[in-house]
Image (spheres, coloured by chain):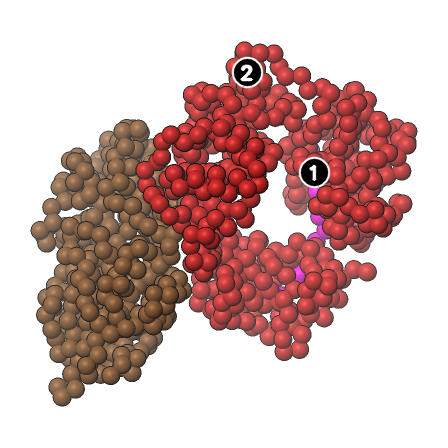
């Protein structure tokens, strides 16, 4: 049966009726599958949450043990049967390559296959397994960077900009704005891979999640909480990572001669960087850029593409030009252009 | 070109003026003539010609990308040069080496024939990185906005040459790109350029808006009080070498107003308001607009809408500069000058003395009743003519704006600093059950309000027409504007002068907004 007859957009989010299952719901619901741990997808208060073990660990770190009444940790490629036993929906999670624990959701019902990509990217990311192509009838893709102006440069190139800047401004504290989950750890790893071995200093909001990554076996090198540094003047010439919201905050005023850096896919648009008073923009994204979105649609090769949060118009148009049936799903509530880029 | 592109990139992301100045001075030190002079011109906005038209850039781009995707991208990015920089096929990262110098680029584009510009531009865009493409398009269309104004460029040059900014100001309009003489003088390698006989623009003196606090502190007898006319501020310059009419920003608009310049024969620099005048009768701003930007105005237009100058200051009389005299003394010169002038297009701006605060307020009320007038100008009688916007010398006291409650109908994204925010709004008034658009506003709200408006637009979109979003007819704004005029261009039959946000009425139901009839009743006849 065509997914349009059993999937719908309800106010909490995308809903699969025969499984009574919401995907990344914004409000507490009976049954939810959570694709990944970013706050605009993973909320607390559901009765029953399905997610990868890592995503559940992230949610517990963020919301505490009480984040849901029941949880079911699911391995990648492991199937779960939901709904009526004689008319089941089979759900399987596959890697999405977005952040630690991120998953695509495959739903199979009455012979039709639907894949919800969640947020995803195609670049190599040492913190999670790569995005897997899952053949399906309907592919729901995100479109955060769904315009042809977005082509993300290699992360090595962007990290080099930071390392060069440290050489040009050896007395300035380089304050790097970076989303607490995923981006922060990826930036740290890329710095390590570029041979940066000095301690990296962290804003308090990033510490627990970095510890979680380390517990998951991801080596981040020496990390020090800024709060534990007694003489802030010693942070001159060092790298401090903080959530983007803290860049212009009072918190940062204690740091010596700050050079404001921001790691985000949005940094590609100059005016965006300047609006945030960023002096050194680093274009680093955990989402697909435009060529990768197109490549993914081609490789998945579904008969229909549904496009969610982001710049749907252009991707719907492009998919149609490529010969796919395509439409925009207007899901409310996902951060439109915020910190997760 | 590589060094220039790098400089722009650094300047763009540098917010401190001091750091910007340091970057530019460093660039001037290590860059040869004429490249650095062209860079100064590009940044200060004194390049005389476009290398290529924005439309040429767009055409080239559209040969390389689907137009729908181009429009969506442009709408999102909010700026042509950056959109093209990113969309242009080819490499994006590595800065290209071996590009021509800035001087060579100026030379090539200024001598290229009509047919050669396109292939030349395409060839360079192919070779460049995204950042370099951005610089070239900005440079070539004279759209550089990197937070360095002409004024700050003069200050930077003064700092570079260890001289006073006034020295640079005085020379500025008499020298031109690539500024080799000026730079040679600043570096102590040559004499100061001589510009005494040039027909040049002299930077104007500007006023501050009058606030309540200043108003109560004012001693009216120490001030020259004049009407603030509703025209455009101009400077008329006439020397032995020629004559010209300049806008307040220094653009030469002589071609549009030959009738005004015709009878001027004296050597002088006059400061005044350009108006349409039938004898001593002042016509509306609306009429003046018909004559603006006409490179070759038809005789019929000139005859039906004759230009006049309401003169309020004189900067030079014969060969003598008067800027160091107090206003009262300049006024005497001006009076004599107008009396002796052969031109009947020059009118002396009348003064309306007041001896008390009450009388001053009375003058203000009278001025507000006169439709050719926007309010009062208050100038200290002892003020010297100081270019720029010095504090405490000149004030404008504009009449209270008119207000109506209108409903937001459409929204469009802004540009530059407001890139990707919905910041341009079309609003309407009711005619029976229908809303008719009456104007557009892009200002008057705070950054915080802008974010809220942007968010509201995204949540209340009911239709899309290219870059324009139609929104639910639910949000009322109090619009302030200076006047209502009849207009055949709009379905509503009216046009507002300088509409802006006064207040956002989040609380007010849309059906309680004003009717078109109410708005029309504010029209002055």
Q: Chain of mark 2?
A: B
Which mark is on residue A234? Answer: none
Residue A236 picture quarter: top left
Q: Looking at the image, which residue is at 16% across and 83% down?
A: A88
Colour seen for chain A: brown
On the image, the x and y values in percent for residue B139 come to 50, 37
Q: Is residue A146 left or right of residue B181?
A: left
Camera-side residue of A207 and A250? A207
Asked if residue B258 shows in the view, the reply is: yes
Residue density around tag 2, few if under 14, some if 14–19, many if 20 or more, within 10 Å: some
On the image, the x and y values in percent for residue B190 come to 58, 11
Camera-side residue of B310 and A320? A320
Residue A87 picture quarter: bottom left
| Disc 2/disc 1 C-alpha distance (Å) | 30 Å
- Total residue callouts: 2
Residue density around tag 1, few if under 14, some if 14–19, many if 20 or more, within 10 Å: some
Which mark is on residue B247? Answer: 1
Colour seen for chain B: red
Q: Chain of mark 1?
A: B
The residue indicated by pointer 2 is B184
On the image, the x and y values in percent for residue B18 come to 45, 29
Q: Quadrant of the C terminus of chain B?
A: bottom right
Asked if A257 appears above or below B366 in the picture, the reply is above
Asked if B460 appears above or below B443 in the picture, the reply is below
Camera-side residue of A69 and A282? A282
Q: Looking at the image, which residue is at 54% across and 12% down?
A: B188
Q: Looking at the image, which residue is at 34% across and 69% down?
A: A323
Dominant secondary structure, magenta: strand
For label 2, the SS is: helix
Marked residue nearer the N-terminal end (2 or 1): 2
Residues rendered magenta in the picture: B392-406
């Amino acid at each position: 049966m065509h997914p349009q007859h059993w999937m719908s957009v309800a106010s909490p989010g995308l809903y699969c009726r025969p499984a009574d299952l919401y995907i990344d719901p914004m409000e507490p619901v009976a049954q939810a599958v959570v694709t990944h741990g970013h706050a605009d997808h993973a909320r607390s208060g559901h009765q029953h949450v399905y997610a990868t073990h890592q995503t559940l660990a992230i949610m517990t770190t963020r919301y505490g043990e009480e984040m849901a009444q029941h949880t079911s940790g699911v391995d990648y490629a492991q199937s779960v049967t939901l709904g009526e036993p004689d008319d089941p929906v089979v759900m399987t999670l596959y890697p999405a390559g977005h952040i630690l624990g991120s998953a695509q959701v495959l739903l199979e019902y009455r012979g039709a296959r639907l894949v919800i990509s969640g947020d995803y990217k195609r670049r190599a990311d040492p913190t999670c397994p790569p995005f897997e192509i899952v053949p399906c009838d309907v592919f729901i893709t995100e479109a955060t960077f769904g315009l042809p102006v977005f082509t993300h440069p290699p992360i090595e190139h962007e990290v080099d900009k930071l390392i060069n800047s440290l050489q040009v401004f050896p007395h300035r504290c380089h304050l790097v704005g970076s989303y607490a989950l995923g981006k922060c750890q990826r930036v740290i790893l890329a710095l390590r891979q570029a041979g940066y071995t000095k301690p990296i200093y962290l804003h308090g909001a990033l510490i627990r999640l970095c510890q979680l990554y380390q517990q998951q076996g991801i080596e981040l090198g020496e990390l020090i909480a800024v709060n534990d540094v007694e003489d802030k003047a010693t942070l001159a010439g060092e790298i401090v990572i903080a959530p983007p919201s803290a860049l212009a905050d009072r918190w940062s005023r204690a740091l010596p001669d700050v050079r404001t850096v921001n790691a985000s896919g949005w940094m590609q648009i100059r005016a965006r960087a300047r609006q945030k008073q960023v002096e050194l923009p680093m274009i680093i994204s955990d989402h697909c850029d435009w060529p990768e979105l197109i490549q993914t649609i081609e490789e998945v090769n579904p008969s229909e593409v549904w496009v969610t949060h982001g710049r749907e118009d252009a991707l719907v148009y492009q998919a149609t030009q490529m010969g796919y049936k395509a439409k925009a799903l207007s899901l409310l509530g996902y951060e439109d252009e915020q910190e997760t880029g | 070109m590589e060094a220039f592109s790098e400089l722009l990139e650094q300047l763009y992301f540098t917010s401190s003026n001091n750091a910007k100045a340091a970057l530019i001075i460093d660039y001037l030190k290590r860059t040869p003539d004429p490249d650095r002079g062209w860079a100064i011109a590009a940044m200060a906005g004194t390049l005389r010609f476009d290398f290529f038209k924005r439309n040429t850039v767009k055409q080239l781009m559209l040969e390389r990308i689907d137009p729908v995707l181009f429009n969506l991208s442009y709408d999102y990015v909010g700026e042509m040069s950056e959109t093209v920089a990113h969309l242009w096929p080819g490499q994006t990262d590595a800065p290209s080496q071996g590009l021509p110098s800035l001087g060579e680029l100026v030379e090539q584009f200024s001598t290229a024939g009509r047919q050669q510009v396109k292939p030349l531009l395409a060839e360079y865009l192919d070779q460049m990185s995204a950042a370099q493409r951005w610089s070239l398009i900005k440079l070539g269309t004279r759209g550089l906005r990197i937070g360095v104004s002409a004024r700050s460029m003069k200050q930077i040059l003064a700092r570079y040459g260890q001289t006073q900014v006034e020295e640079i100001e005085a020379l500025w309009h008499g020298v031109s790109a690539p500024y080799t003489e000026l730079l040679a003088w600043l570096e102590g390698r040559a004499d100061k350029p001589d510009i005494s006989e040039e027909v040049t623009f002299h930077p104007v003196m500007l006023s501050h808006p009058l606030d309540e606090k200043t108003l109560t502190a004012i001693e009216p007898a120490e001030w020259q009080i004049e009407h603030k006319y509703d025209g455009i501020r101009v400077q008329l310059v006439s020397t032995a070498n020629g004559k010209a009419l300049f806008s307040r920003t220094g653009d030469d608009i002589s071609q549009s107003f030959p009738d005004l310049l015709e009878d001027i024969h004296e050597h002088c620099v006059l400061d005044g308001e350009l108006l349409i005048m039938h004898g001593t009768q002042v016509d509306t701003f609306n009429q003046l607009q018909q004559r603006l930007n006409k490179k070759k105005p038809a005789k019929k237009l000139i005859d039906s809408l004759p230009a006049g100058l309401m003169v309020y200051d004189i900067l030079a009389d014969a060969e003598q500069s008067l800027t160091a005299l107090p206003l009262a003394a300049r006024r005497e010169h001006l009076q004599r000058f107008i009396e002796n002038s052969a031109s009947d297009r020059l009118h002396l701006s009348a003064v309306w003395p007041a001896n008390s605060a009450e009388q001053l307020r009375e003058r203000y009320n009278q001025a507000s009743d006169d439709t050719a007038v926007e309010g009062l100008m208050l100038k200290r009688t002892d003020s010297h003519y100081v270019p720029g916007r010095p504090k405490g010398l000149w004030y404008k006291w504009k009449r209270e704006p008119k207000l109506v409650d209108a409903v937001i109908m459409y929204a469009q994204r802004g540009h530059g600093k407001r890139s990707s925010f919905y910041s341009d709004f079309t609003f309407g008034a009711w005619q029976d059950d229908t809303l008719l658009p009456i104007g557009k506003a892009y200002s008057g709200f705070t950054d915080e309000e802008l974010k809220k408006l942007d968010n509201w637009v995204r949540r209340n979109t009911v239709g899309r027409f290219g870059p324009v979003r139609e929104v639910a007819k639910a949000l009322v704004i109090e619009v302030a504007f200076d006047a209502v005029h009849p207009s055949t261009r709009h379905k509503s039959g009216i046009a507002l002068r300088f509409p802006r946000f006064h207040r956002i009425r989040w609380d007010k139901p849309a059906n309680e907004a004003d009717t078109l009839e109410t708005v029309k009743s504010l029209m002055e006849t």
